[in-house]
Amino acid sequence: MLLYLGVSDHFWRTGDDSGELHELYGSLSRSFYSLYMSMSSGRSWGEVAGPLMTVSPLLLALFLTFITLKTFGILNVVTSVFVESAMRTAQHYRELLVQDKQREHENVVRHMREVFRQIDDDKSGTISMDEMEDFLADPERRLYVESLD
């Protein structure tokens, strides 16, 4: 809106409301459209800013400030979306690793209980030295226990 007001003032002072300046900033809607086109790469912002230099360096500075703030604002939003997505993915991955380790631990415990049940021949709930020696006397079982690392 300030660009339109500045250009309108220029038109009023000079009486010249023709040319590219009028095409880009001759009305409020044209001013908004020119800003939109320069932000969305519909038109080079250099082309849109050029005519403002003939009116006032202040208007050019205002335009450049607008472009800079909008560009960095959009970049910050896009960057924050990617960072947040990466953080969620990393957190989910950590949770999956913890769950996987818990399942692995539960499987090892279950497996060891089964091995100890097989060693406990008299089903007393304890393993005697004789039961352990009998179990390890079988070479296949010995290899199996050794491979439990």
Image (cartoon, rainbow, N blue to C red):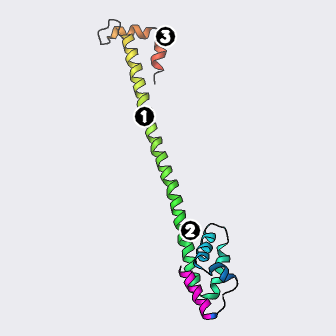
What residue span does the magenta drawing correspond to? Answer: 1-13
Residue 85 location in percent, x, y? 50, 50
Query: Of discs 3 and 1, which sits in the foreground?
Result: 1
Read off the residue under disc 1: 99
From the top left corner, tell me how far across and down residue 114 is, in percent.
39, 15
Q: Position of residue 118 (x, y in %)?
A: 39, 10
**61 relative to 102 in the view: left or right:** right
Residue displayed at 66% across by 83% down:
22
Whether residue 7 is situated above or below residue 100 in the rendered picture: below
Q: Main secondary structure of the magenta part?
A: helix
Residue in the picture at 67% in, 72% down: 44
Q: Earlier in the sequence, mark 3 or mark 2?
A: 2
Q: Which residue is mark 3?
A: 139
Q: Is residue 129 left or right of residue 71?
A: left
Identify the element where label 3 is drawn.
Answer: helix
- Residue type, numbered disc 2: Thr
**Residue at the farthest right position:** 19
